[in-house]
Amino acid sequence: MTTLYFVRHGKTQWNLEGRYQGGHGDSPLLPESYQEIKELAHFLAPEPIRHIYSSPLLRAKTTALELDRQLPGQIPITIDDRLREFNLGKMEGMRFTDVATQFPAQLHAFRHAPADYDPTVIAGEGFPELVARMRPAVDEVAQADHGTGCYLFVSHGAALTALLQTLIGTPLAELRSHGGLSNTSLTTLETIDHGEHYRLVKWNDVHYLSKTPEASDTI
């Protein structure tokens, strides 16, 4: 059995401010996020993680490097551009409230009706395109594993939600069926057939964090 852990990056300044970051926007992790990453690393420490894969965006890369530093052993880390967040085009850097005013139809579809999402107006990336670039990054690892490996992926809330639901066979219209993902959360999948099928073990686990969840933690 191959075990795949997926981590959403630590909370950032723009997360706190309610801004869309997307695949080209970015902002630094909050100081308290480093403690939360440490708590996640403590929880993961007993797991024999063989490799860490991360989005190149600074918020994810910093989270991955901190995890690597905190986890025992010398775990190799690979930065993979395929794991970056959605390209949100004109919405990147905008506050959620401003997006709701300027692009109400696109925002509603993106958050609540992904099968109806048309990113043309915002010059962004669609769900099928996002999954097409992200899925091979996971499938390649599962296919190459001998069936006993444990791997860690660090990426982004919206992108991971779409990817993970697709991996477990959820239809596009129902990608939000388990809700969103919180900062520094852990979602676990397993496969026993080298990625032909994936099974969801745990969605958006944050029980190891000492903080009280806030509304701005989850997207």
Image: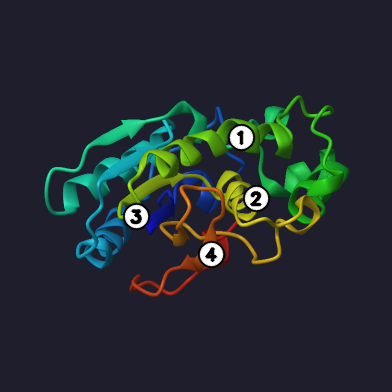
**Residue 127 as seen in the image, left or right of residue 21:** right
Task: Name the mark on residue 166.
Answer: 2
Give percent across and percent down for residue 82. Answer: 51, 30
Q: Residue at x 46, y 47 (%)?
A: 194
The residue singled out by tag 3 in the image is: 33
The residue singled out by tag 4 in the image is: 200
Badge 1 density bin: few <14, some 14–19, many ≥20, Cα 10 Å: some
Q: Amino acid at mark 4?
A: Leu
Distance of label 1 from label 2 (alpha carbons)? 27 Å
Give percent across and percent down for residue 165. Answer: 63, 55
Q: Residue at x 35, y 70 (%)?
A: 209
Identify which residue, 126 or 94, lies in the foreground: 126
Q: Are marks 2 and 4 in contact (CB under 8 Å)?
A: no
Q: Amino acid at mark 3?
A: Ser
Q: Are marks 3 and 1 in contact (CB under 8 Å)?
A: no
Distance of label 3 from label 1 (alpha carbons)? 20 Å
Residue projecting furthest to the left: 73
Badge 4 density bin: few <14, some 14–19, many ≥20, Cα 10 Å: some
Q: Residue at x 43, y 44 (%)?
A: 142
The residue singled out by tag 1 in the image is: 93
Query: Of discs 3 and 2, which sits in the foreground?
Result: 2
Of pointers 3 and 1, the one earlier in the residue sequence: 3
Distance of label 3 from label 2 (alpha carbons)? 28 Å
Q: Residue at x 32, y 32 (%)?
A: 78
Q: Give the quadrant of the C terminus.
A: bottom right
